[in-house]
Amino acid sequence: MVEAPWCPVVELRQYTLRPGRRDDLIDLFDREFVESQEAGGAALLGQFRDLDDPDRFVWLRGFAGMASRTEALERFYGGPVWAAHRDEANATMIDSDDVLLLRPASAAGGFPVPVGTRPAPGEPAPLPPSLVLATIWYGHGPFDATFVEFFEERVRPVLSETGCEPLAYLQSEHAPNTFPALPVRLGEEVFVWFARFTDEAHLDRHLERLEQADRWREEVLPTLSARWARAPQRLRLAPTRRSTLR
C-alpha cells in the first residue's frame, strides 16, 4: 500500500530579481525565512539559483493541504519575522507572482520525506555540488489519469535509461487560492517532474542522451507533444546552502 504524499500541496515559486540582488535575497531567506515558515506549518522543500538566469530565484514550499496552506501563510505573513524583513526582501524583487500551485500526480508522485538535517542559520557550509532539474510541461488540456499512466509506463523508463530518476511528479492544483495576497497562475495546466543530479555534467549528459534516444524521439515525444503538451520549460537549479532538496 502506497502511503499518502508527504506534501499534498506544493508551490513552485519563480522570482525575477533586481540585477545583482539574488545573493542578497538568498542570504536573507536562508537566515530568516526557513524556520519561521516551518514553525507556522509550511515545509520548505528547496531554495535554488537558476543556472541559466542570474536574476531568478526559485523555491518550493509544501503544505499538508489547502486549509493548512491558508493557516500557514496567515501565520507567517501576519507574523513578526515577515514584518521585520519584508521591506528588505521586497527591495530585491521585480516580480514574485510567477507561482504554480501543484499536487502529486499520483500517490507515488510526491516529494520524499527529507533525510538528514540542513545546516543551521549562519553555520559555515559549502554549496551543494548537486543540481535539480525541474521539467515543466504546459498542457493543451488537463493532464488526466491516462497521461499519468503514460508518464509512469512510457516516459519514466526512458528518463531512467538516460540517467534521470524523478524524485517527484506533480500536476496543477485547481483548488481556489484562499490566500489572495499571494497570487498564483490560474488556468494553467502543467505537469512537472523534478530530478536530482550529482553535478552539472551529469545533468547535461542526461539531456544529451535523452535528445538522442530513439524511443524518446520516435515514440514518446511525438505522442506527448501531439496529445498533451507543448515543448517544456526546463529549470536547471543549484541548491542554496540551506536547501532541503539538494
Image (cartoon, grey):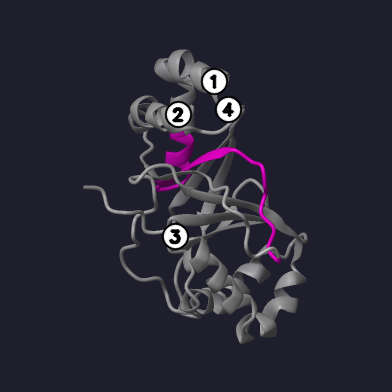
Location of residue 60 with respect to 146 vertically, above or below: below
Q: Which residues are magenta?
A: 181-206
Q: Which residue carries the number 2 mark?
A: 147
Distance of mark 1 from mark 4, alpha carbons? 7 Å
Q: Is residue 7 above or below residue 124?
A: above
Kind of residue indicated by mark 4: Ala
Task: From the viewer's side, name the closer residue of 179 and 15.
Answer: 179
User: Which mark lies nearer to you, 3 or 4?
Assistant: 4
**Near-viewer residue (45 or 11):** 11
Q: Quadrant of residue 156?
A: top left
- The secondary element bearing badge 2 is classed as helix
Per the image, is 116 magenta?
no
Q: Please identify, in this view, whether the residue under mark 2 or under mark 4 is nearer the observer.
A: 2
Work out whether mark 2 precedes mark 1 in sequence or the reverse, and give the earlier one: 2
- The C terminus lies in quadrant: bottom left
Quickly name the residue at label 3: 128
Contact between labelled residues 1 and 2, with CB atoms less than 8 Å apart: yes
Q: Amino acid at mark 3?
A: Pro
Question: In the figure, 220 relative to 152: above or below?
Answer: above
- How far apart are the two marked residues, 2 and 3, measured between alpha carbons? 34 Å
Mark 1 and mark 3 lie on one chain; the one further toward the N terminus is: 3
Is 38 located above or below residue 164 in the figure?
below
SS at mark 4 in the image? loop
Which three-letter amino acid code belongs to the residue tagged 2? Phe
Q: CA distance from mark 2 to mark 1?
A: 9 Å
Q: Which residue is depicted at the point 42% across and 40% down? A: 202
Q: Dot 4, how many residues are within 10 Å of its Cα: few (below 14), some (14-19), or many (20+)? A: many
Q: Are marks 3 and 4 in contact (CB under 8 Å)?
A: no
Q: Mark 1 = which residue?
A: 227
Does the residue at mark 1 contact the one at mark 4 (Cβ under 8 Å)? Answer: no
